Structures are given as structure tokens and as C-alpha cells.
Image (tube, rainbow, N blue to C red):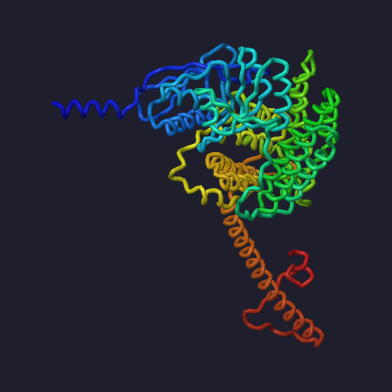
């Protein structure tokens, strides 16, 4: 009996008390402004699974971040329970997506597993990765306003860009909100559960080192090298144009000068898209920082200049040689047009809100610049094609995308872009945007059995498949395996979509757009056609030789007859010989054939 009691006691000590519940506000971008969502975390007996409420609906990025947060909290505490997450419903939104609640959910779950309380005067935002690093998220200004509106004294964020930090500094002054930047989940847990101090410094943005990554052999690098270097040059020009004489400016210049050198190193390693993407994001932020340092931004002028950039985008006719480049340029044109449309100039805006609107417009301008670079790098020549042949593919894929991801955030923006491209008859761009929505709506599988090294080194056949495959390799080299998997699968899907587009390609003179045979089918048909032509020519040759022989015989018979007439006698023809018909004479034969 004593043994059984000890056994029961040991079992009770080995399993946690999987009960308890905690609710806290988590910031969100709701509509065009800032808000908060009341998140409730509950524990239940189980092997460490994560569940999320049905309403409001959640996107795959949110679901993945919840699963990762539950796993990280369990690893940090050493305890295992099922985690139930309820985002509540305030009637303002029916869809939540994005990873920005990951840090808050990790902290709340850890506190429940450890039986600790979490302070209620602080609101947290930020994504978190498998290693426990707190990662940047968007919309900090709007989220900070939402936190201040709930009376929070502290707003815990990841270490963000200078642009975000300058805006948050103004929010601190306006609302009396203390912004605290954190790098690791341990720092946030210590602050939220034990009131530990997180060391801060003004404009706490560290210069990033050039990553120690292997060389990537980018296929056909010439064209895309010019695009990457062009974006870095534009970034470098903005850095040099920043105003002089302020401490903030010196820090900004130092940081972004380091960024330029980092990106040049990434280009030298062969990761062209990755370097261009970093330079693109920096370009947008530097331009916004410049107007923050100089004063109130001129929103109407910026919107007008970006509209002019798009109007002057001189895109050549689409051919069978340049169509992938042109689709890439059209894609960015649609993104820019969508962003321009989203910026509303009516009504009064706070100064900080004007900076946010300016930042949005800078994305549109930067996309226009990239589109120009893509057009400039495109190959010349080829046969002009009819993009209308892709209409049915675009229509089907857009429908699939609408069923997969018509929510908020990045997927909604890309879906709206696909719709805009379709309406403007830019069917290639509609297809590529639809592919993005479809692939990013899928939940990533467990990667334990996936050979990621082999996956990111697979050969891709399309231009943009190769581009995004290189970025997948870049992400994997930095140990971001989930993002690398998603990007590699997107690259693979771009290959499949481009192959379908190639199969229905028709000359610009028109066509019904029915799918052409595959490359193997075309090769077989070519062989059959060559064989048929060869047989036809052989038959013609036989006919020609037969008639030539008949003509020679007729010529000889006629010559003998004329000679006999000239001699004045009658000559009896040889047995079996007969006079050929008139139309078989040499002259008549040539006319008949």
C-alpha cells in the first residue's frame, strides 16, 4: 500500500496542473487605425497541442505563431499542457492574421505553466522564433496608439527600424507611454512576471553584420544583378541626402551606411533578390526618416509624383523572350497602384499619421523604381504574344486564391492586387499574385522529415522561380527554416504557373487560348511532322523520276519517226511500241505538271 501511495504521489508530481486561464490585451491594426484584441489563454490536459477559437477566423501565419509560442513556452518552463487561445470578438474584425501576437502568447502561456501572474500595465507586440528571439512586426505606431488608448503605461516591442523608433518617440511624448525594446523572450518574461529591467539606449537599433553564408550560384545573374545594384545605389543616394547637424542624423547615417555595405556583401555571395529586398525596405524607411527630420511631409505631392512615375513606366510589348520580366514589372505596378489607392488624403490627420501615410506612398514609389529596373534588365527580341491567352488560367487561379485567403493583412493586399491586375487585363500579374495567396494560405508541415538543404538547391525553370529559390537558400543559411520552406514552395509553384502560361502562349495576332501541348508532346508531334514531310517528298521524287523516264522514251520515239519521214520510207514500229499521246510530249508535260 505504501508503494502505491508513493507511486500515485510521484505521478501527481510528474504532471503539471493543466488548468488556469489568463486574459490580456494584445495590440492589433484594425481597419485603418490602432486597436487591441482581448486574448484569453487556457490550459488543458494534453501533449502540448495548440488550439485557436473559430471566431474570429485566423490566418495560417497566426496559427503557426500560436503553435510555435506554445512549444517555446513549454520548453522554457519544462511543463507540457494543451494550450487554448481565444481572440474574443469585439465586432470590429472577423479575421486575424500575422505573427505579432507570438511574444505575448508565449509570455502568457509560460506564466500559466509556471503559476505566475503577468503585469497588467504593459502591452506586448512582436513575433518570436524557435530560438526565442523577438522579431520585428509592422504597424507599431497604430499599435502603440491602441495600447495608449487602453491606459497602458508600457509598450513592449521588438528592436525596430529608425523610422518606427522615431514615430514611437513622438507617441511617448504625446500619450505618456513608455516604449521598451526587447531582443529575447527571456527579457520580456523577466519584465512581465518579475519586473526586471530591460536595458535600453536611445534609438536602440544595432548595425547588422554581413551574414556568414555560403556562395549561391544564381542562374543567369546578369539581369538581376543590375536590379539589385540599382536598388542599393538608390538607397545609398538617400543616405547621403539626409540633413546634417543632428545627433539623430548621425546615427541614422551610420546605421544605413552599414546596411549598404552588408547588402553589397550579400550580392557578392550571389543572393541577388535578398540584397535587393533589404535595400528596398531600407529605401522606404530612409525616405520617411528624411521627412521626419525635415518636418511635415507633403502627402499630395508625394502621391502625385508616384502617379507620374507609374504613368511614365515605359513597358515594351510582351514577347516570348521577355514575358517573365514583364509580368514581374506588371506585378509591382499593381502593388504600387493598390497602395496609392489605399492612401486617403481626405480628412484631418495628426502629424504622425501623415508620416505613416508618407511611408505607405514610399512603398508605391519604390515598387515603381523596381518595375523600371526589371524592364531595363529584360531581354530584347522575340515574338510579340497575346496576354489574353492567359485569361482562363488567371480566372481559375484567382478563384482559388479567393477561396484560400480573402482576409486581412498581406494576403488581402496581394489578393486585391490580383483582382486589380485581372480587371486591367494584366493576366500574368494576376496569376503570380494568386499563386502567392494560395501558397501562403497553406499551413507549413512539420519539417523534421524534410531535407531542407536539398529542397532549396532544386533547379527551378522560371525566372521568378529561380529568384525566390535563391531567397529560400538565403533564409535557410540564417536558420529560418520555416520561412525558407514557404519561400521554396512558392518558387516551385511559380514554376508550375509559368509552365502553364508557356503552354497557352499565342502570337499577338490572336488565338483561342486553348492549352498547347507540353514540351514532350511538341517534340513527338515534330518528329511525326518531319516523317510525313519526308514521305511526301519521297513520293514526289518517285513521280518525277517516272515521268522523266516516260519523257525520255517519248523523245526517242519521236526522233526516230522524224528521221524515217525525212528518209521517205515507212518504217514499221517495233512490236509493242506505240505513239505516245500528244500531252506527253516534252512541252505539254511541263504544262501538265
Q: Is residue 516 left or right of residue 257?
A: left
- Does 181 sit above or below residue 501? above
Taking depth in this image into account, of 5 and 291 the one nearest to the observer is 5
Residue name at image x 52 percent, y 17 percent: 24
Query: Which of the image's four quarters has the N terminus?
Result: top left
In the picture as drawn, the residue positioned furthest to the left comes out as 1
Taking depth in this image into account, of 403 and 108 the one nearest to the observer is 108
Q: Is residue 150 left or right of residue 296?
A: left
User: Where residue 245 sits: x, y (%)?
Assistant: 85, 33
Residue name at image x 70 percent, y 31 percent: 203
- Does 509 sit above or below residue 523? above
Query: Which quarter of the picture shows residue 26?
Result: top right
Q: Is residue 438 visible?
A: no
User: Where residue 97 sits: x, y (%)?
Assistant: 57, 25
User: Where residue 35 sits: x, y (%)?
Assistant: 62, 16
Query: Which quarter of the picture shows residue 412?
Result: top right
Query: Which of the image's four quarters has the C terminus?
Result: bottom right
Q: Is residue 246 visible?
A: yes
- Does 563 sit above or below residue 71? below
Amino acid at each position: 500500500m505504501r508503494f502505491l501511495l508513493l507511486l500515485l504521489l510521484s505521478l501527481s508530481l510528474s504532471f503539471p496542473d493543466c488548468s488556469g486561464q489568463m486574459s490580456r490585451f494584445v495590440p492589433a491594426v484594425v481597419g485603418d487605425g490602432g486597436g487591441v484584441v482581448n486574448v484569453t489563454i487556457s490550459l488543458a490536459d494534453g501533449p502540448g497541442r495548440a488550439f485557436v477559437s473559430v471566431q474570429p477566423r485566423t490566418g495560417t501565419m497566426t496559427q503557426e505563431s500560436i503553435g510555435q509560442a506554445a512549444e517555446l513556452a513549454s520548453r522554457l518552463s519544462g511543463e507540457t499542457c494543451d494550450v487554448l487561445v481565444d481572440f474574443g470578438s469585439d465586432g470590429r474584425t472577423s479575421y486575424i492574421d500575422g505573427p505579432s501576437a507570438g511574444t505575448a502568447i508565449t509570455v502568457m502561456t509560460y506564466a500559466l505553466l509556471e503559476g505566475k501572474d503577468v503585469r497588467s500595465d504593459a502591452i506586448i507586440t512582436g513575433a518570436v522564433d524557435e530560438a526565442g528571439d523577438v522579431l520585428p512586426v509592422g504597424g507599431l505606431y497604430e499599435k502603440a496608439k491602441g495600447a495608449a488608448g487602453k491606459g497602458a503605461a508600457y509598450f513592449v516591442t521588438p528592436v525596430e527600424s529608425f523610422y518606427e523608433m522615431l514615430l514611437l518617440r513622438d507617441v511617448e511624448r504625446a500619450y505618456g507611454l513608455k516604449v521598451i525594446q526587447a531582443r529575447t523572450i527571456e527579457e520580456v518574461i523577466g519584465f512581465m512576471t518579475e519586473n526586471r529591467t530591460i536595458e535600453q539606449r536611445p534609438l536602440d537599433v544595432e548595425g547588422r553584420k554581413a551574414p556568414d553564408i555560403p556562395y549561391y550560384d544564381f542562374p543567369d545573374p546578369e539581369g538581376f544583378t543590375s536590379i539589385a545594384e540599382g536598388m542599393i545605389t538608390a538607397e545609398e543616394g538617400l543616405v547621403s541626402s539626409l540633413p546634417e547637424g543632428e545627433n539623430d542624423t548621425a546615427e541614422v547615417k551610420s546605421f544605413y551606411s552599414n546596411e549598404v555595405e552588408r547588402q553589397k556583401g550579400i550580392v557578392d555571395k550571389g543572393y541577388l533578390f535578398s540584397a535587393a529586398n533589404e535595400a528596398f525596405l531600407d529605401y522606404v524607411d530612409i525616405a520617411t526618416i528624411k521627412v521626419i527630420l525635415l518636418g511635415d511631409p507633403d502627402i499630395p505631392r508625394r502621391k502625385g509624383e508616384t502617379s507620374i512615375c507609374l504613368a511614365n513606366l515605359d513597358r515594351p510589348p510582351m514577347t516570348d523572350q521577355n514575358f517573365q520580366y514583364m509580368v514581374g514589372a506588371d506585378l509591382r505596378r499593381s502593388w504600387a497602384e493598390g497602395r496609392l489607392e489605399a492612401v486617403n488624403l481626405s480628412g484631418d490627420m495628426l502629424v504622425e499619421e501623415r508620416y505613416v501615410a508618407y511611408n505607405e506612398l514610399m512603398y508605391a514609389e519604390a515598387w515603381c523604381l523596381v518595375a523600371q529596373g526589371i524592364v531595363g534588365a529584360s531581354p530584347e527580341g522575340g515574338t510579340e504574344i497575346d496576354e489574353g491567352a492567359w485569361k482562363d488560367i488567371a480566372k481559375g487561379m484567382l478563384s482559388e486564391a479567393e477561396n484560400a485567403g480573402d482576409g486581412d493583412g498581406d494576403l488581402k493586399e496581394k489578393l486585391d492586387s490580383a483582382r486589380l491586375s485581372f480587371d486591367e487585363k494584366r493576366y500574368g500579374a494576376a496569376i503570380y499574385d494568386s499563386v502567392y495567396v494560395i501558397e501562403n494560405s497553406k499551413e507549413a508541415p512539420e519539417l523534421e522529415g524534410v531535407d531542407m538543404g536539398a529542397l532549396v538547391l532544386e533547379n527551378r525553370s522560371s525566372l521568378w522561380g529561380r529568384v525566390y529559390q535563391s531567397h529560400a537558400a538565403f533564409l535557410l543559411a540564417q536558420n529560418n527554416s520555416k520561412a525558407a520552406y514557404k519561400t521554396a514552395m512558392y518558387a516551385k509553384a511559380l514554376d508550375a504557373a509559368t509552365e502553364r502560361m508557356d503552354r497557352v502562349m499565342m502570337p499577338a495576332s490572336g488565338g483561342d487560348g486553348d492549352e498547347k501541348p507540353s514540351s514532350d508532346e511538341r517534340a513527338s508531334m515534330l518528329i511525326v511532322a518531319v516523317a510525313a514531310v519526308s514521305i511526301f517528298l519521297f513520293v514526289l521524287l518517285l513521280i518525277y523520276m517516272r515521268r522523266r523516264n516516260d519523257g525520255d522514251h517519248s523523245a526517242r520515239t519521236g526522233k526516230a519517226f522524224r528521221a524515217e519521214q525525212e528518209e521517205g520510207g515507212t518504217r514499221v514500229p517495233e512490236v509493242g511500241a506505240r505513239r505516245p499521246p500528244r500531252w506527253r510530249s516534252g512541252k505539254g508535260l511541263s504544262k501538265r505538271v
